[in-house]
Amino acid sequence: MANEPPRKRARTKLARKSEGGGPGGSCEAVDLGCAGEREESRPSSVPTPLGTGDAVVATASSSSTAWRAVLRLAPTCRPSMSVHPQLDVDKDVVTFGRLPSCNVVLDSTRAPQMISRLHGRLVRRMEDGKPQWLIVDNKSLNGILVNGVPISEERPLQSGDVITFGRVMAPPEFEFVFEVTVPEKEALSATAVEELQQQMARIAELQRELDEEREQKRVEAQQRRQATKSSLDVAELHSELVCSICQDWLVHAATIECSHTFCWSCISTWMCHKRFACPLCRQPVARQPLRSRALDAIVQKSVMQLDHGERAEYGQRVASAAKALEKSRRLHVELESSVNAALNRGKGFFHIDSRWSRRDRETFATGVKEYSGETRETYCRLTGLTVQWVHSADLAKLTQALENLEISDVECALEDDIRQRLLMFLQYG
């Protein structure tokens, strides 16, 4: 078993101080320090006068501030030989094994030779002014376990670790609990460190809450800015995505040659009244408008940012426009079927390149004015007026067609101008 640490013996001298050389006088106590201390290391001592009844007690220097490590026999341990229930570890190296020369002799009658002759060592090292204990296995046959886990060569120990020498048995043969007594100053320091760590953790928590609050405010501010920006964008887009004819959001956007865009139904109605000029810039329009699917998508997304009432109103306009297109499509199908049947039977109107009488002109004008777009083009097929005919006819036939259709708004007699005007007539009149 590990030896007890040597105790320091205090030495104190009592001296009588004579006054005037007489038998009387007074006594005083002088501290001579502890035995074994070097003189220069002793604290300075001043003689202390003593009175009647004073008690003098010699005390050794306190060792309560020293680190202390012990191996305490586990409560469930039942060794087959006598082992002290508490082993003080006060050396830099404490050896364990069967040899009598070991500091702690361990031997088992239940499992002979389970413990090697020099089974292991407990080593104390100083790190940063503090001791650190390690358990070292001296390549023993049955090894050393710390907290039930075998060690390979060495392992640092913490207070509370359970060390088992040899095999695991029931009940345990040699099982010890490693305990370290922390000096009072160190304990106070550890408490201060723990309090500081708690304060730092609290500060970190408060900082995290502050950061989260700032982030939440930043996100809310960004959302408000985006909402304001979206509102401004919708207001700005409305001026760009509004039809200048109906003064409302574009429905089935259609773009003409000058790049201005209108509702399909609005620009079609405008041109059916033979207004072949842009409603905004008044530039001539010689070609049919083109549908713009991209603008339709932009308008749809912009309207979705409006309130429920405005979205519902726009939805009704889109539904009405779609219904009108469907009606026009059905009318076109019916008229095309009738025209094809009449042409197959050899029936037809007077031809476009022949001279029409006034009655012929009135008859054709009365029938064609009810139609526009593809349906109008189908009706014109009865007279032979088609897109193919317009592109293939010579100037004389084109001029005769203008006279038959009573078109007088062609500014010059160039073939291209006449052809373009007749193509517009096929769609709008």
Image (spheres, rainbow, N blue to C red):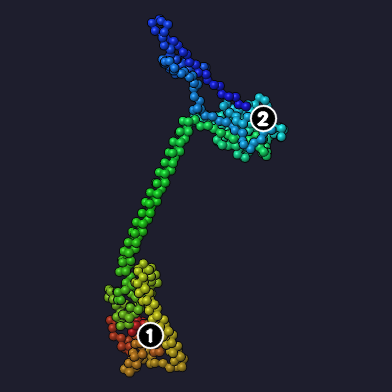
Classify 10 Å Cα crowding around label 2: few (below 14), some (14-19), many (20 and above). few
Which quadrant of the rendered structure holds the N terminus?
Answer: top right
Q: Secondary structure at mark 2?
A: loop
Q: In front: 246, or 176?
A: 176
Question: Which circle marks residue 352 in the picture?
Answer: none
Residue 107 appears in view: yes
Q: In front: 395, or 339?
A: 339
Q: Is residue 155 left or right of residue 346?
A: right
Amino acid bearing label 2: Ser
Q: Secondary structure at mark 1?
A: helix
Which percent across, then down, holds residue 24?
41, 8
Residue 298 appears in view: no
Q: Which residue is mark 2?
A: 82
Could you tell me which residue is drawn at 68 percent across and 31 percent down?
81
Q: In front: 423, or 107?
A: 107
Could you tell me which residue is drawn at 38 percent across and 5 percent down?
20
Which percent across, then down, holds residue 67?
52, 29
State the separation of the CA atoms marked 2 and 1: 121 Å
Give the number of callouts.
Answer: 2
Classify 10 Å Cα crowding around label 1: few (below 14), some (14-19), many (20 and above). many
